[in-house]
Amino acid sequence: MPKAKIELPDGTVITIEGTQEEVTELLAYYQAKSPQKTKQTPPPNAEKTKTDPDESSVNYTQIINLVKNVDEAEEIERYILDRTSQVDRSLLPLYIVHQYLDNSLSLSSGDISKITTDLGIPISVANASRTLSGTASRYVIGDKVRKKGRTIKYKLSRRGVKYLKSVISGSSDEN
């Protein structure tokens, strides 16, 4: 719900909560009277939606097209997409980024969820996160220490690359 704080010339502070239209209407009324004292507070989740300017955005379409069109596409479909291993499915986008995009991107569990959903093998964000922090943790490298509510970007480790190559080749050793 939108919020705004207004400080009147006499020092009175008014906090407004309501629909976007109500807040806008009241702000317009008080701005006409004292525009220099009006400020709108950012929504509580505003900090979470900010992204690093250095962080390159993920091109989901490019990753999905690579999965479908690389030389090993048939093996990927046969040994990962057609099977039910959530670990393998969660690691697949990281493998594609590592092998075909020069490991230039880190992916969050949300990114992995979107990619797998577009590939027709949906994994929810919660399941992708749980898998990457649990069963698949030995195959990935996170950019931060895990903490509730914090987005972690993952890359595939050397061990993860070796594991996924063995899965794609059909010899699925776990070590």
Image (cartoon, grey):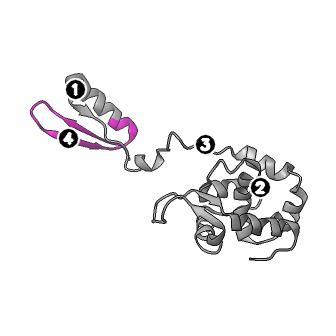
Image location (x, y in percent) of residue 68: 84, 51
Q: Residue at x 76, y 61 (%)?
A: 121
Query: Magenta residues?
Result: 1-23
Q: Residue at x 70, y 70 (%)?
A: 87
Mark nearest the camera among 4 and 1 is 1
What is the three-letter code of the residue carrying label 2?
Leu
Mark nearest the camera among 4 and 2 is 2
Task: Tell me the residue that label 1 is attached to.
Answer: 36
**Pointers 2 and 3 in contact (CB under 8 A)?**
no
What is the three-letter code of the residue carrying label 3?
Ser
Q: Is residue 19 magenta?
A: yes
How many angstroms separate mark 3 from mark 1 (CA)? 37 Å
How many angstroms separate mark 2 from mark 1 (CA)? 52 Å
Mark 2 and mark 1 lie on one chain; the one further toward the N terminus is: 1
**Pointers 3 and 1 in contact (CB under 8 A)?**
no
Q: In this rendering, is residue 104 above or below 169?
A: above
Q: Residue 98, located in which quarter of the rendered image?
A: bottom right
Mark 4 and mark 3 lie on one chain; the one further toward the N terminus is: 4
Q: Residues within 10 Å of mark 1 (few under 14, many from 20)?
A: few
Task: Tell me the residue that label 3 is attached to.
Answer: 57
Task: Tell me the residue that label 2 is attached to.
Answer: 119
**Pointers 2 and 1 in contact (CB under 8 A)?**
no
Mark 4 and mark 2 lie on one chain; the one further toward the N terminus is: 4
Mark nearest the camera among 2 and 3 is 3
Mark 3 and mark 1 lie on one chain; the one further toward the N terminus is: 1
Image location (x, y in percent) of residue 92: 74, 60
Q: 48 or 162, which lies in front?
A: 162
Task: Tell me the residue that label 4 is attached to.
Answer: 14
Residue at the outermost left position:
10
What is the three-letter code of the residue carrying label 4?
Ile
Mark nearest the camera among 3 and 1 is 3
